[in-house]
């Protein structure tokens, strides 16, 4: 099924392109030294791209999964609703199983599925048409959401602020503009002088490879450090604020984000530095009372023991590689969303923000 | 001047060998995949080996510098004491300038120099003979010191303890056995079951490359993690104690050690986990009132931006690369030395321990 739907180039960095039924993903494993776009036409390919981190970042994973669900639907031969629905659910489950922590993946798939579920009397062909529109809508909305988050959040960063960020919560992690980096971009756009310290973010080096790359492209001053240097810079008074993204936020404000975020939050508290989380409403999971219920993905040893083909550790050494950790709400100064900022007692305020999004 | 002095192989891992006036250093830049021994016959070579981290670790740097000072003396043509002394001091200053933070470097050179200074009436040839003996004594003493440290410290680790260490304070960082890892080895030798989490220790990866390698060789269970994972494991109750080495300890107990140590100490305090420092008396610098006076070496960008030849960050990105940080005494549960353990009010106790060492 060929289409002529295109996401227009709104300017700025994007992790994906979509045209005529083909999804292109910028291979984030190869940045910053190679800019290679890979093409996807079926849901299995998209699932593999998410699993192997061609695309990463909670909102960008959600967008890729939405296109994956559209490819999944497009290729289903069944003509009855029941046949179509059964197979569509099965394929969406394959996409959902690729990464366990980021809730945006499930959120995007749920949104795609609910469109079908809500319209059981429509012919299968119409579902296929509507699902493409829905994937495009999810992607375009994300960019608007990030710009709104930037407007709400930029007031929290003072002129001259030296801001630490961990991992990449930027344009590459989203539909564009970014969550944490979107707030930084909005502060810069508001005329403030902002400089950024980017944690390199072992083992996958999202900070070194992606955050440094995209801030450098936008001309925002960025200084790269190893993760273990943030505490030293804080102790020297060289960091004024911390801002990070999120992969899942529990009802009480506990926030799962890239491994190491929790350590940064503890250090920020020790030094009296504000610690901000920027994330879309779709990241909030009200079904989980607190962060202890968020599943934490453990990834393979090789990410830690090797750098490309280069062996960094002795053969056969045991490794732990949790990809995320949970920062308790008490360490978070504020959570910035597209509908406003939450702080203090997160439970009622997050409920309110989620309700606004409905 | 050929000699037949040899350091006997006491068994176990050593970062150096010495025979017939030639110093061999195990090239720690190539571990764990290559075991290459480099030969040194002059002080310039030893200075370069320290500067480029062929040998690293505060006590091992002290030992290498002592041999460097002996090579420096050996090659001085002057026959008068004054001529010899002037040139010897100049050459020792070259060795002292290689790394600024570890005090053991200055301590070892001071010890070599004081031997000459104390005996101005001796002929130059005798100084040259005595300096070789002194370098050998410094090296052999260090091994004995580490074993004593192990005896004093092992009681602090309970049976079954899961112990986090940062960087490499092991046999490779010393004359053998190790400071922090020496305490772990002593606890294992005392019949306790100890397992170790090794922080990989960016950017130089001493934990991944050296600590994991030497513990694996000794059959002590070791699990490698990225630096940013320690907080997560602590929050999960998987770490019972932290033990690290030191590069310089101020009179009040503030301790400079590998970058990232401070962050680990803050995390340990947050989780109520004891944080131990193991270091020889020669690491204590009573001339500095507190840690703010310890010079912190900043190393080159490439250690952070590259892994071997592989580029990890975009071209031209700004980098900070402090090689050490300072952990304030209030975060340190105890300092373990070869003359006993200090805790609580460090100032009088460290003075007492230093006096014992005289």
Image: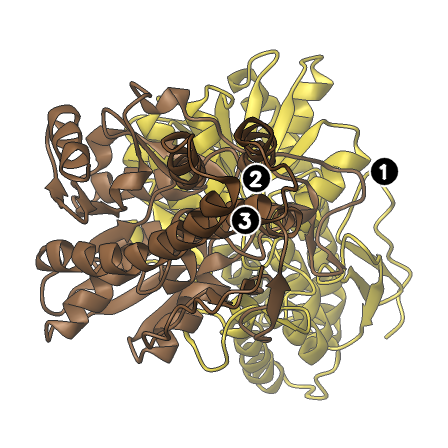
Chain colours: A yellow, B brown
- The CA distance from mark 3 to mark 2 is 7 Å
**A257 or A3: nearer the eye?**
A257
For label 2, the residue is B95
Q: Are marks 3 and 2 in contact (CB under 8 Å)?
A: yes
Q: Is residue A196 left or right of residue A106?
A: right
Identify whether B325 is placed above or below B173: above
Q: Residue at x 10, y 71 (%)?
A: B190
Which label sits in the foreground, 1 or 3?
Answer: 3
State the mark number for residue A252: none
Mark 1 and mark 2: Cα distance apart in space: 55 Å
Q: Which mark is residue B68?
A: 3
Residue A252 sits in which quadrant? top left
Q: In this picture, is A33 found above or below A190?
A: below
- Check chain identity for marks 1 and 2: say if they share one: no
Give me the disc on residue A11. Answer: 1
Q: Position of residue A225 (x, y in %)?
A: 58, 39
Disc 1 secondary structure class: loop
Tell which subunit mark 2 falls on. B
Where in the figure is residue A297, as x and y percent of width and height? 43, 66
Q: What is the chain identity of the residue bearing mark 1?
A: A
In the image, residue B150 above or below residue B280: below
Do dots 1 and 3 share one subunit?
no
**Chain for mark 3?**
B
């Amino acid at each position: 099924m060929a289409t002529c739907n295109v996401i227009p180039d709104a300017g700025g960095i994007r992790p994906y392109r979509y045209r005529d039924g083909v999804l292109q993903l910028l291979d984030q494993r190869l940045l910053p030294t190679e800019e290679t776009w890979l093409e996807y036409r079926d849901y299995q390919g998209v699932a593999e791209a998410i699993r192997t981190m061609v695309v990463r970042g909670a909102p960008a994973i959600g967008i890729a999964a939405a296109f994956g669900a559209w490819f999944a639907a497009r290729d289903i031969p069944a003509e009855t609703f029941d046949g179509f629905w059964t197979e569509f659910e099965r394929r969406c489950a394959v996409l959902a199983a690729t990464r366990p922590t980021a809730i945006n993946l499930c959120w995007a798939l749920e949104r795609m599925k609910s469109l079908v579920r809500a319209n059981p009397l429509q012919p299968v062909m119409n579902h296929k048409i509507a699902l493409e529109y829905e994937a495009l809508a999810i992607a375009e909305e994300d960019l608007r959401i990030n710009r709104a988050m930037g407007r709400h959040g930029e007031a929290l960063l003072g002129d001259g602020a030296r801001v630490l960020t961990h991992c990449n919560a930027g344009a590459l992690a989203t539909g564009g503009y970014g969550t944490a980096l979107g707030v930084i971009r909005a502060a810069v756009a508001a005329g403030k002088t902002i400089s950024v310290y980017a944690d390199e973010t072992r083992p996958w080096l999202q900070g070194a490879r992606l955050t440094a790359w995209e801030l450098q492209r936008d001309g925002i001053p960025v200084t790269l450090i190893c993760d273990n240097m943030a505490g030293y810079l804080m102790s020297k008074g060289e960091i004024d604020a911390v801002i990070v993204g999120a992969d899942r936020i529990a009802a009480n404000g506990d926030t799962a984000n890239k491994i190491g975020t929790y350590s940064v939050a503890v250090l920020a508290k020790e030094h009296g530095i504000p610690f901000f989380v920027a994330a879309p409403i779709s990241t909030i999971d009200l079904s989980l009372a607190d962060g202890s219920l968020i599943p934490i993905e453990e990834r393979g040893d090789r990410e830690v023991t090797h750098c490309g083909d280069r062996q960094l550790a002795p053969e056969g050494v045991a490794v732990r590689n949790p990809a995320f950790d949970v920062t308790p709400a008490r360490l978070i100064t504020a959570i910035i969303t597209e509908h406003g900022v939450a702080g203090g007692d997160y439970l009622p305020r997050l409920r309110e923000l989620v309700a606004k999004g409905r």
